[in-house]
Image (spheres, rainbow, N blue to C red):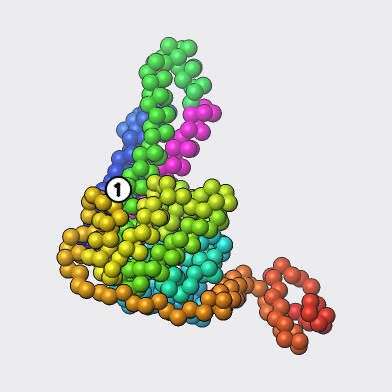
Amino acid sequence: MWEQIRSNQTRSAILTVGMGALLALLGYFLGLYFFYNGIGGAILALILWIIMSLVAYFQGDNILLGMSQARKINHDDHPRLFNIVEEMKIASGLEAMPSIYIIDDPALNAFATGRDPEKASVAITSGLMQKLSRDELQGVIGHEIAHIKNRDVLLMAMCSVMLGTIVILAWYASRLMLFGGIGRTRRSSSSGRGGSGQIIILIVAILLMILAPIMAQLIYFAISRRREYLADASSALYTRYPEGLASALEKIAASPDQLKSANKATAPMYIINPFRKQGMAASDLTSTHPPISERVRILRSMAGASFADYALAYRQVRSGAKAVLPATAVTAAGVIPLRAAQPDAKETEEIQRARETSCLLWQLNNYRTVNCLCGTTLRVPPSFKEPSIRCPHCGRINPV
């Protein structure tokens, strides 16, 4: 897969330079309008671009994890989840174990981020942990591990930060123009000092402020769809059970819960677009991800677990479409049979998953545990200030 890795590294450089050019163009016209110095404005914009590129490279993952309100957990916090991530790390040949983060949200979703495979993280929502079976969760983790393995994570982290910078700068500049710039143009016009020129510059600057975020977002979205297909194919290869990811995608898409911490800059990072109409399932119509139903059909059409099997299924589902996987990966693929589903006592497992997830969230939120003599376990929130608590089952008063 070195062909895809090199492609992602090249795209990272091109996109960073492209977004820098947009910033410089925006800075030029804003500098020309506010300070009569377009070159100075472009230089300031390029300085901002350099600073944000460095921030995105070295701290982009921490920024995205912070924006997502994700919290890091250790092995003892959730051994089952760590076991699944370790299985996928070994199956993928990843150099290092990624850090694991939990997002306290009932929505079903997940993403990966990081600078490289040596410094990467996987974040999943509490809703995902509670609703997915082991096979399904393994499919999702395999998909996210593939993004790390294919160097997608650096590309998306840098694009997220740079896109956010362009949007914020455009918004801030529009506020300046709204409250001070238009009056300034009127004064220049009434005094006869280049009023028409100022109006033209103002129009160009406003157009740039509108178009720059849109252009940056279009560039960002253009890279998202292909990488999702490749990550799906890689997950099928790592797990040897494409039905696990297919079933997980269906459950995630059917969930009506909106992910509260998601925004337009971070949306392409998630396994499924986190935005949907209130109370409704996710739609196939999204600019950041391939159609969900199509991804599921491709996975369920696979006769084996290799890249060649995925490429064949892709051509069957999308008749006439161009190849989505690198030719070297497809030609090098051997015969990899599918495995059977893991035994799953659904009702028992669902109860156990709910308990595991609840205990983890209580621990992360600093709840205290009080064990009553009747056998009831009481969870006391950190905001509770009373010295004792009554057991709801036996009525006994227990010291906190």
Q: Which secondary structure is most common in the magenta stretch? A: helix
Q: Which residues are magenta?
A: 153-180
Residue 136 in view here: yes
The answer to whether residue 370 is left or right of residue 160 is: right
Q: Position of residue 354 (x, y in %)?
A: 58, 73
Residue at 46 percent of width and 75 percent of height: 134
Q: Quadrant of the N terminus?
A: bottom left
Any magenta on residue 177?
yes
Q: Number of numbered discs present? A: 1
Please tell me how crowded label 1 is: few (under 14), some (14-19), or many (20+) other residues with Cα within 10 Å: some
Q: Position of residue 18 (x, y in %)?
A: 29, 43
Q: Position of residue 105 (x, y in %)?
A: 56, 62
Q: Quadrant of the C terminus?
A: bottom right
Residue at 57 percent of width and 62 percent of height: 106
User: Identity of the amino acid at label 1?
Assistant: Leu
Q: Position of residue 180 (x, y in %)?
A: 52, 27
User: Mark 1 highlights which residue?
Assistant: 15
In depth, the one of 201 and 240 nearer the eye is: 240
Instruction: Please determine whether, in this image, residue 282 is positioned above or below residue 21.
Output: below
Residue 52 in view here: no
Any magenta on residue 345?
no
